Amino acid sequence: MKLKHILWLIAAMPATAIAQTQDLGELNVTASRVTAPSITSSRPVTVIDRQAIEASHAATVVDLLKGLANIVVRDTSGVGAKSQVDLGGFGESGAANNVVLIDGRRINNPDLSGTDWAQIPLDQIERIEIVHGANSVLYGNGAVGGVINIITKIPASGGNISLAGGSFGEFSGQSRIGADAGKTRMEANFSGLTSKGYRDNGFFDRFDGGARAEADLTDSLSLHLSGNHHRDRAGLPGALSSAQMRANRKQATTPQNFSRTTDNYIDGGINWLSDFGLEADIAGGFRRRDVHSEFVSFASISDFVQRNASLRPKLTFTAGSDIVSRIVAGADIDRGNGSFNFGGAVGNTDFDHKRDGYYGELTVSAADNSWAVNGGLRSERIRDSFTKGSVSAIANQATAWDVGASLGLSERLRLRLNAASSMRFPLLDERFSFFSGTVDTTLKTQTGRHYSTSLRYDMKSAWLEVSASRANLNHEIYYNPVGGAFGFGANENYGAKTRHDVIMLGGHWHAHDLLQFSANYTYSKASFRGGISSGKTIPAVARNRFGAEWKADWMQGLSSSIKLTYVGASFLISDQANARPRLPAYLTADAVINYRWQNVEMFARVDNLTGKKYSNYGVFSTFSGDSFYPAPTASFHAGASYSF
């Protein structure tokens, strides 16, 4: 699809969407790490609310993110088990350049595995907030392309049971039961899924069980506690060459490889709210993650164990009437340890991971939120040590700043401006070489300068927003497949500076209950600013992306939607020379119909309605050539739920 065709589609629609789900208006979000009206944010914010989550009947969180502005989802499993979310156009390293939180708890893994999206059951989610742009002051290391904050539901009385099944032998179920005694609220939930997968050895099985509790001890003092047990087992079918894709795109090149994950956490905190504008929140938790992988095709077994304790104290002070000032100050303290075990010559390596971040932000706004300005600072230090016979320790420190404004130019028109710096420290296995068993002490901290502006126009039943951003990065971290002392690959810093430019256009128009339109367009240019690749495009970043949705409420209880997702062509991962054929563009259509009667709800969903054959993940290697992970063709899912 050519750029002019995409622009014609946008022009033909009365409005388009950055947030396809909801007019933000005065909605309170946590973009500033405290609950505040979204219009005071100096960055664009996408919100997926509970209504949109339920109407989608998506199987995973990443299914909800597909087709949203400035987001690309890549999946090597075909069932969402090994998905990578790129927010901001960073290609292969996209997962390391955004921060993902659940109720403010950071869930990014400290290694290259990124975020384990499979451990986030949809039935527990109230809404998802996506803050576009660098936000290292409030969220620290890795908040380069943006922040995805998942807010879980407040425990409530009652419960529900749901069952669903579909293509590829998929079957899932979930149950929830809760109680609300006024000042005390509790909830327990269980969910599971099993699937044979689209490809041979593409199976995926998972189970989650969790509980949450809240208690109001007094009018100003409250407690909260949550925990979850997650386990899954997934096949690893391997990549396919172009010839193998043509012969049989469902085949597995590694028919016996698999991985097994167990992930447990407990998190809690206490909140105190004074009568004079001071709020204190002290939260913390503990997490243990164990990953066992068997690569039978390489006669190799690996084990990764991660333990992490976190503490997140935060103070908020708000004062003023006509002009309101709010100061947020806090810390992010992590203490982690664990081990890599790859057997053979590499053997076992223990690691310790320490993170200390301290931040503060001041926001001054009019009482009616007609204008707001903000500024903030953060200092963060990470220290990683590896023990394999002897101890190798590396420490990195960086600071970040942020200034922004949200200005109401009229009752309907709002301008947002932001300038910020960012930081991304090397991940554990970016520092450690599995081939040599040594630690790379030369890898530098990635830093950046970011500038963004957006303009939003609100109408009675529609809104339109356009935004533009530029990120100039130094020492951007990437994987060089022929790097390292032995030429077997290593994580390195780009020698040249890089630039990421993004333009987003989006909006929503509710013309009628039968005619609810949303759409978005993203232009993303990621390029080298010097060196031998000067002017070339960073791999795995599609220049053009488009998403659209038509939703219709046909009658009370009956609704349907059709969603289109277009991702343009991109260079294969590791093709910095832009010399290989590009990963082809693709356009998919998903449809869902939903019927609710009293306490019963039924749905049917078809993904990839046209049966498009495509891949959203492709990589180039000097050893094996071009390799691809095929995405599923058309699939059908249906289910029912009962609430009580």
Image (tube, grey):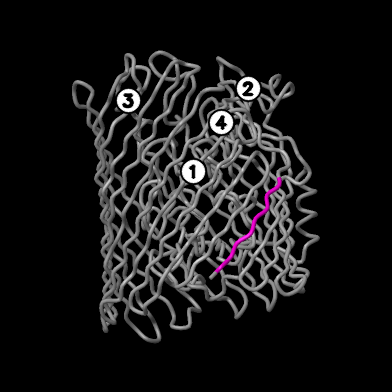
Q: Earlier in the sequence, mark 4 or mark 1?
A: 1
SS class of the residue under badge 2? strand
SS class of the residue under badge 1? strand
Magenta-drawn stretch contains 637: yes
Q: Earlier in the sequence, mark 3 or mark 2?
A: 3
Front residue of 607/604: it is 604
Magenta-drawn stretch contains 27: no
Front residue of 210/18: it is 210
Disc 3 residue type (three-letter): Asn
Callout 2 environment at 10 Å: few (<14), some (14 to 19), or many (20+)?
Answer: many
Q: Which residue is mark 2?
A: 626
Range of the magenta residues?
636-643
- The image quadrant of residue 444 is top left
Front residue of 282/420: it is 282
Q: Which residue is mark 4?
A: 534
The answer to whether 85 is drawn above or below residue 534 in the figure is: below
Q: CA gap, disc 4 to disc 1?
A: 45 Å
Disc 4 residue type (three-letter): Ser
Q: Residue 341: which disc?
A: 3
| Residue 21 appears left or right of 7 | left
Q: Residue at x 71, y 24 (%)?
A: 248
Q: Earlier in the sequence, mark 3 or mark 1?
A: 1
Q: Earlier in the sequence, mark 4 or mark 3?
A: 3
Q: CA gap, disc 3 to disc 1?
A: 24 Å
Q: Residue at x 53, y 48 (%)?
A: 87
Q: Earlier in the sequence, mark 1 or mark 2?
A: 1
| Residue 212 appears left or right of 567 | left
| Residue 87 appears left or right of 179 | right
Q: Which residue is mark 1?
A: 206
Callout 3 environment at 10 Å: few (<14), some (14 to 19), or many (20+)?
Answer: some
Q: Position of residue 115 (x, y in %)?
A: 45, 44
